[in-house]
Image (cartoon, rainbow, N blue to C red):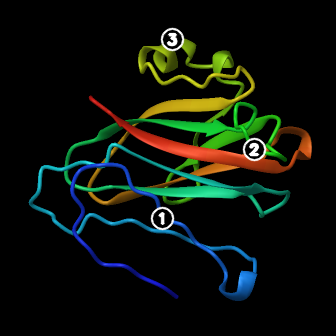
């Protein structure tokens, strides 16, 4: 396994995972803020991957540190991507650390449309999914899962943006 430990100045960064000798498989990328006394906050994080069926889905883990709840928007995009083999209709789930469903969404305008629009970062395609939620803190972990509607497969992006409370 690989790891990089470094201090980063504010800005946008990309972590890329490749298999040795062009091998393929499932990989996990993690980013941690190790400076517990800094007022810096992660603005957003996203990843692109291949959504398949069964347990071969796209997953993002979120941990809310500190003691202040964090309001977030989680988005699952596919139709608006400019890549071949994109996921035609993503479904998004947000689950707590015990695996309990907090909220799910298929087609972002079907639920929370006003809240999502108010964030100014609503998905650009009506078939894409989004959830706005306020997540309790204290190191609590959450999981966002992207699946394809009707067993669809393809490339999708999952994004988590921290919102001002």
CA–CA distance between discs 2 and 1? 19 Å
**Crowd class of label 3 (few under 14; some 14 to 19; many from 20; radius 10 Å):** few
Precedes in sequence: disc 2 or disc 1: 1
Q: Judge from the rendering whether residue 34 lies leftward or rightward of residue 155; answer left or right.
A: left
Element under label 3? helix
Report the front residue among 78 and 56: 78
Precedes in sequence: disc 1 or disc 3: 1
Res 148 → quadrant: top right
CA–CA distance between discs 1 and 3? 33 Å
Residue at (84, 47) in percent of width and height: 85
Res 105 → quadrant: top right
Say which residue label 2 marks: 83
Foreground disc of the pair 3, 2: 2
**Crowd class of label 2 (few under 14; some 14 to 19; many from 20; radius 10 Å):** few
CA–CA distance between discs 3 and 2? 29 Å
Element under label 2? loop
Q: Are marks 1 and 3 in contact (CB under 8 Å)?
A: no
Residue 91 location, x and y as percent? 73, 38
Residue 142 location, x and y as percent? 48, 54
Report the front residue among 6 and 68: 6
Element under label 1? loop
Decide: is 41 above or below 103.
Answer: below
Res 21 → quadrant: bottom right
Decide: is 19 above or below 62.
Answer: below
Residue 133 location, x and y as percent? 44, 33
Residue 67 location, x and y as percent? 19, 50
Say which residue label 3 marks: 114
Residue at (58, 72) in percent of width and height: 17
Q: Which mark is residue 102?
A: none
Residue at (90, 47) in percent of width and height: 151
Say which residue label 1 marks: 15
Q: Judge from the rendering whether residue 141 lies leftward or rightward of residue 100; answer left or right.
A: left
């Amino acid at each position: 396994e690989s790891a990089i430990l470094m201090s980063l100045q504010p800005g946008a960064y990309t972590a890329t995972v490749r298999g040795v000798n062009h091998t393929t498989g499932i990989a996990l990328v993690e980013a941690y803020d190790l400076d517990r006394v800094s007022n810096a906050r992660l603005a957003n994080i996203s990843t692109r991957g291949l959504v398949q069926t069964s347990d071969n889905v796209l997953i993002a883990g979120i941990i809310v540190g500190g003691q202040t709840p964090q309001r977030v928007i989680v988005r699952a995009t596919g139709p608006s991507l400019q890549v071949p083999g994109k996921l035609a209709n993503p479904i998004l789930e947000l689950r707590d650390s015990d695996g309990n469903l907090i909220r799910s969404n298929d087609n972002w305008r079907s639920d929370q449309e006003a809240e999502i629009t108010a964030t100014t970062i609503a998905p650009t395609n009506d078939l894409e999914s989004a959830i706005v939620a306020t997540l309790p803190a204290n190191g609590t972990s959450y999981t966002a899962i992207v699946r394809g509607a009707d067993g669809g497969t393809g490339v999708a992006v999952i994004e988590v943006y921290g919102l001002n409370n």
